[in-house]
Every structure is written in C-alpha cells, then in structure tokens.
Image (cartoon, rainbow, N blue to C red):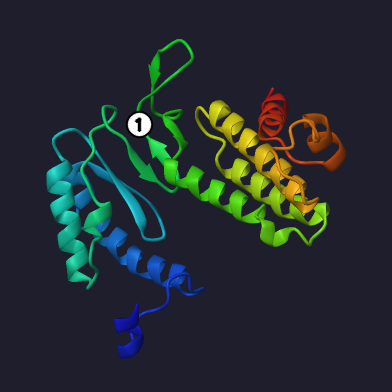
C-alpha cells in the first residue's frame, strides 16, 4: 500500500517473506490460544494456513471464541480483517477457506451431506481459473503456435484439478472442460483469421487426442481408478 511504502513499513503483498512473517506471528497466537487455556474454555480448535484460519467451536461458543481471538490478536499488534471474519453455523450456512466452500451440499439423489465431503471449489476459485483460461486464449497470442497454448493450459488445468479434487467436482469439471474447449476453438479460428466458434472445424477428438488438451473429467476418472 502507498502508506506503508511511504513509511517504509510492512512488506508488499505476495512478497516471498510474507508467509514466513505470517507464520511467525501466527505461532504466537497459537501458543497463547492453547497454552493459556482459550481452546479448552471456548471448546474451539484452530485450523490455519499462514494467516488464514478457522475457529471450530461447539454450538454456543462462537461469540466468546471470536471475542477472545480478537483480544489476543490485538495484544500482538495485529488487526483482524473484519470483512472476511464472520460467525457461521454449520451445516445450515457455508464459508470459504483456502479456495474451498465448506458446508452442506446435496448428492445426485438430493440427499444432503457435509463433513469430510462437505466441500467444493469456491465460486471465487472457479472464476479465477476461468479468467486465466480466457487470458491464455485471447487474440494477443495469435502469433504464437498452438503448442504454446497447450503448454500454458495443460499445467494450469492439471495443477488446479490436483488441488480442487475434494467433494462434488464432477459438474464443475464438466463446465470447465466445455469452457476450455470453447475458448481454444475460438482462438484457433481467430489465429487463422476466421470467425465462428470452430465446433465444425475442431472436433473433441482433434482437441484431446491430436493436440493433447487435458480433460479434467478424464483426470478425475483416472484418479478414481487408481484409488480402487
């Protein structure tokens, strides 16, 4: 931020040292939370990754746990991001954590489930991926060869699916597969100076078998088979 830069305080967002500092400060919070009895008093466990964390409480303990958390953070000179902080009652409500939405979801027969499988990629995570796919297939890359786009798209898709493979992802994978194929077809047409969607010119077989585009649904099927 400009203020921090002008005062020569703080670190830029995304700086390599930021995760180290986050863990250093958060360790103090964790030691105080468990060492001073806050966890037992509020029956609240902490799950964190760097400075992102969730307090898991039994019903009726959430308000007290949040107040204690704010107090401990304040003592260490830290400020809680109130825009991202809220009290959620599971499974009736949901919350996002580390790219996943946690809460109650419904299976193919309308049966509700949550817990270990009560997760799915968040809307924000999906939107971020869609944006990257779009940016990788715009007309600015028309001068490059087709292989360069595959070398950009395939690692992106493989990495995303490697992380977002928990919960009901089948329909999400299908949507992403359709979007990637559509964007790549349009890019191929524009590269040739043509208009249109390219469905007739570039079949699924051409995209996935000839060019070697990754299909998330295939990755998921292969992963499931490997676990059997």
* Residue for badge 1: 103
Left/right placement of residue 163 relative to residue 122 reads right
Query: Residue farthest to the right?
Result: 210
Q: Secondary structure at mark 1?
A: loop
Quadrant housing residue 138? bottom right
* Nearer to us in this view, 164 or 190: 190
Indicate whether 201 appears above or below 188: above
* Nearer to us in this view, 43 or 75: 75
Indicate whether 3 appears above or below 163: below
Quadrant housing residue 69? bottom left
Left/right placement of residue 101 relative to residue 195 reads left
* Nearer to us in this view, 74 or 81: 81
Quadrant housing residue 172? top right
Which residue occupies 44% across, 30% down?
116
Which residue occupies 23% across, 61% down?
80
* Residue 223 percent coordinates (x, y): 68, 31
Which residue occupies 80% across, 35% down?
202
Query: Residue farthest to the top?
Result: 109
* Residue 27 percent coordinates (x, y): 35, 64
In which quadrant of the rendered image does the N terminus lie?
A: bottom left
Left/right placement of residue 171 relative to residue 63 reads right
* Nearer to us in this view, 15 or 31: 15
């Amino acid at each position: 931020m400009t203020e921090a830069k002008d005062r020569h305080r703080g670190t830029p967002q995304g700086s390599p040292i930021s995760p180290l500092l986050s863990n250093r400060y958060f360790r103090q919070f964790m030691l105080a939370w468990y060492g001073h009895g806050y966890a037992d008093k509020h029956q609240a466990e902490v799950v964190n990754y760097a400075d992102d964390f969730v307090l898991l409480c039994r019903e009726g303990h959430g308000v007290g746990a949040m107040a204690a958390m704010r107090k401990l953070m304040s003592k260490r000179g830290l400020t809680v991001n109130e825009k991202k902080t809220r009290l959620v009652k599971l499974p009736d409500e949901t919350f996002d954590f580390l790219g996943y939405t946690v809460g109650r979801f419904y299976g193919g027969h309308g049966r509700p489930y949550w817990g270990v499988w009560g997760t799915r990629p968040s809307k924000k995570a999906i939107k971020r991926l869609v944006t990257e796919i779009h940016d990788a297939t715009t007309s600015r890359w028309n001068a490059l060869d087709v292989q360069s786009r595959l070398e950009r798209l395939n690692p992106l898709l493989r990495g995303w699916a490697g992380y977002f493979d928990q919960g009901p992802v089948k329909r999400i994978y299908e949507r992403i597969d359709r979007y990637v194929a559509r964007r790549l077809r349009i890019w191929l047409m524009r590269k040739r100076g043509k208009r249109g969607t390219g469905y007739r010119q570039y079949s699924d077989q051409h995209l996935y078998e000839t060019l070697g585009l990754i299909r998330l649904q295939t990755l998921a099927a292969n992963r499931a088979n490997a676990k059997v």
